[in-house]
Image: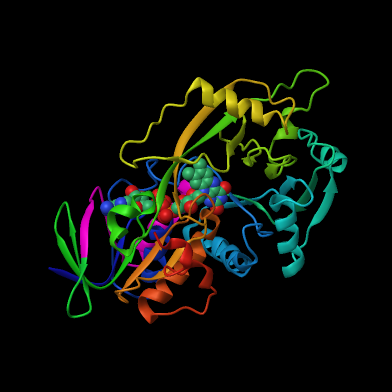
Amino acid sequence: MNNVDVIVIGLGSMGGAAVNALAQRGHSVLGIERFWPSHDRGSAHGGTRIIRQSYFEGLEYVPLLRRAYTGWRQLEEQSERSLMTLTGGIYIGDPQEETFAGALASAQHWGLPHDVLSSEEITERFPAMRPAPHAKGLFEQNAGFVDPEATTAANIQVATMHGAELHFGETVLSWTATKGGGVEVVTTRGRYGADRLVVAPGAWSERLLGEVGAPVASERQVVYWFAPDTSAGKPSLADYSVGTQPVFIERTDGNEQVFGFPIVPGQAPGVKIGFFHDYTPTDPDAVNREISEFEIAQMQSRTLDLFPHLTGRLLAGSTCLYPSSPDDHFMLGLHPEHSQVTVATGFGGHGFKFVPVVGDIVADLSTRGRTDLPIGLFSLEREALRR
Ligand SMILES: Cc1cc2nc3c(=O)[nH]c(=O)nc-3n(C[C@H](O)[C@H](O)[C@H](O)COP(=O)(O)OP(=O)(O)OC[C@H]3O[C@@H](n4cnc5c(N)ncnc54)[C@H](O)[C@@H]3O)c2cc1C
C-alpha cells in the first residue's frame, strides 16, 4: 500500500487548492478525482465566478477575502495564467435589506473603498441597468470575476510542478480512520494509506461524510446568457460589456435575488445571469441538465426588472451544483471524531472567490491541526448543522 503524508479526495475548486498548498509546503500528496481536470459535472464551470469584498453574507468573511485576493495574484504568477479580472461590482436593493445594507455594513466595518449610488446615479454610470426608483447600490471597485476552469487547471498545474501525484477518473468509495492515527482510502482502482486526509467532494459530500451528519444538499442551479437589444436609442453592446458594466447582485421589493456578469470577451456575447438560489435539491449523479421553457421565461422576466433592454434571445445556458449547508456558511475544519481528517465542504453558491485561502486553511489544519485564520463561523459542530 502506498503511503503519503496527505490524501485529498476531490480535485475541484477546494481540493485543487488543497493539493497545491500542501505540495508547495513540501508534503507528499496524493489527490484523487472521479472526473477529469476542470470538468463540468460539479460546481466549478461556466467561465466566471464573482469575487467581491463588501460581503453581505457576514463580516467574518472579509479578512479571508483580503487574504484570498493576495492568493489569486500569487496563483496567477505561479501558473502564468490570467485568472482574476476586476470590473467593479454593484449590489443593488432596498436600502434596509441584506443585499445593499449588508454590503454597506461590511464596507464600513472594514473600511473598504465604496460608493453609495441612488437608482438614477446607477443608470447614469452603468447605462444598461435601470433599478427600481427607491433602490440603492453599493459600488465596489475592488470586485470582478475569476475564471473557475482556469483556476482549477492552475492549481493542478502548480501542484504537479511541486511533486503532487494526482489521479483522475478514479472514484473514492470509502475512507476509514486507522487505529494508528492514519487513514485508509478505498477507490475504484485500489487502496491507499496516509497520515492525513482532506475530504473535499463538493456536491457529493453526503456520500463521504454522511457519518459526520454533514447535511450538504446538492442544489441544481442554472445560469443563462441573454443577448441585449442594442437597436437605436438603446444601450450599446459596450454598455453591457467588461469596461462599463460591473458584476452585479440585485434584490428589490422582495423579488428573488439575482447575480450576473458583464459580457466577457471570448465568451457567449450575452449577459450571464442566474438566481442566487433555485432551492432544487438533486441527486448529483442524475442531474437534469435540460433547461425548460418555463425556467427560461421565468429568468427572462426577472432579468427585465434590472435590464429593461436585455430582451434578446437566450444564447446559452448551463446547469451547475451548489454544495449547500443549512445556514449557507461553509463547513471547514477538523473532523469532530478524527483529528487526522480535514473537511472542506458546504461552500454553496458563494465559495469560489475563497479558493486560494481555503487551500491555505486546509494545509494548516491537515499539517498543524490548527490555523491562525478566522474560521470559527465554519465549525462542523455548530448548532445549525445538527440534523
Ligand atoms: C452556477 C453557479 C454559480 C456560482 N457563482 C459563484 C460566484 O459568483 N462566486 C463564488 O464565489 N462562488 C460561486 N459559486 C459557488 C462555487 O463555485 C462553489 O462554492 C465551489 O465551486 C465549490 O467547490 P468544491 O470544491 O466544494 O466543489 P467542486 O469544485 O465541485 O469539487 C468537488 C470535486 O470532488 C469530486 N468528487 C466528488 N466525489 C468524489 C469521489 N467519491 N471520488 C473522487 N472525487 C470525487 C468531484 O468530481 C469534484 O471535482 C457558484 C456555483 C454555481 C454552481
- Residue 270 screen position, x and y as percent: 62, 30
Query: In the image, is residue 343 above or below residue 308?
Result: below
Q: Can residue 149 be found in the magenta stretch?
A: yes
Q: How is the image coloured?
A: rainbow
Q: Residue at x 74, y 62 (%)?
A: 105
Viewer-nearest residue: 362 or 220: 220
- Residue 215 screen position, x and y as percent: 39, 56
Q: In this orientation, does residue 153 appear?
A: no
Residue that lies at the very extreme toward the front in this rendered image: 387
How many labels were placed on the picture?
0
Viewer-nearest residue: 44 or 328: 328
Query: In the image, is residue 167 above or below residue 319?
Result: below
Q: Residue at x 49, y 41 (%)?
A: 279
Q: Can residue 135 be found in the magenta stretch?
A: no
- Range covered by the magenta-colored residues: 147-175
Q: In this orientation, does residue 342 appear?
A: yes
The quadrant of the rendering that contains the N terminus is bottom left
- Residue 338 screen position, x and y as percent: 29, 74
Viewer-nearest residue: 323 or 380: 380
Query: In the figure, residue 195 lies in which quadrant?
Result: bottom left
Side of 348 relative to 275 (left or right): left
Q: Residue at x 67, y 37 (%)?
A: 255
Query: In the image, is residue 63 above or below residue 179?
Result: above
The quadrant of the rendering that contains the C terminus is bottom left
Query: In the figure, residue 104 lies in which quadrant?
Result: bottom right
- Residue 2 screen position, x and y as percent: 16, 68
